[in-house]
Amino acid sequence: MASGVKPRVKAPKKAAAGEIVTIKTLISHKMESGQRKDGDGNPIPRSIINRFTCDFDGMNVIDVEMAPAISTNPYFQFDAMIPGAGDMVFTWYDDDGDVYSTTKSIAIG
């Protein structure tokens, strides 16, 4: 498991039904490519976030596959239509099998 990984999401707490809102996500992650070596000359194992998904009440909103060239601390901003009250689940997948997830509830108001 990568150390210091912290997912962050900025999403509105309320939206009108059918409103398009802007979602911002960032995950703190070192994103090791597997090509660098440590002080003793040993390769540092590859550890990158290779996929990001967002689902709203079980329906996929966005699904992104990433390659080793993605930057440290990947940031995504996208628009989503809010059909009604529900939960947005944000999930990041790491090469080493770790999965990081956070949920934001959006009310209709």
Image (spheres, grey):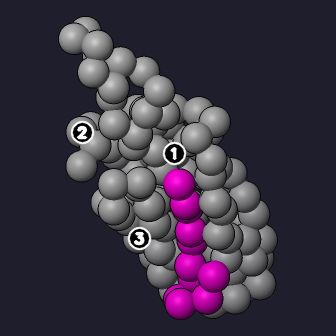
Q: Which residue is mark 3?
A: 103
**At label 2, which amino acid type do we have?**
Ser
* Image position, residue 16 (x, y; %): 70, 80
Q: Which residue is mark 1?
A: 26
Q: Residue at x 67, y 70 (%)?
A: 62
Cα–Cα gap, marks 1 and 3: 14 Å
Residue 94 makes an appearance in the image: yes
Picture quarter with the C terminus: bottom right
Cα–Cα gap, marks 2 and 3: 21 Å
Q: Check if residue 108 falls in the magenta segment.
A: no
Q: Residues in magenta?
A: 50-60
Q: Earlier in the sequence, mark 1 or mark 3?
A: 1
Rendered position, 85 above or below 96: below
Q: Residue at x 41, y 54 (%)?
A: 95
Q: Nearer the viewer, residue 10 or 76?
A: 76
Name the main secondary structure of what is drawn in magenta: strand
Instruction: Tell which tag, 1 or 2, sits nearer the viewer.
Output: 2
Q: Secondary structure under badge 1? A: strand
Q: Do the numbered discs 1 and 3 sit on residues whose CB atoms are within 8 Å?
A: no
Q: Check if residue 52 falls in the magenta segment.
A: yes
* Image position, residue 67 (x, y; %): 62, 47
Q: Secondary structure under badge 3? A: strand
**At label 1, which amino acid type do we have?**
Leu
Q: Which residue is mark 2?
A: 3
Q: Alpha-carbon neighbours of circle 2 within 10 Å: few (<14), some, or many (≥20)?
A: few
Q: Quadrant of residue 28?
A: top left
Cα–Cα gap, marks 1 and 2: 16 Å
Q: Alpha-carbon neighbours of circle 3 within 10 Å: few (<14), some, or many (≥20)?
A: some
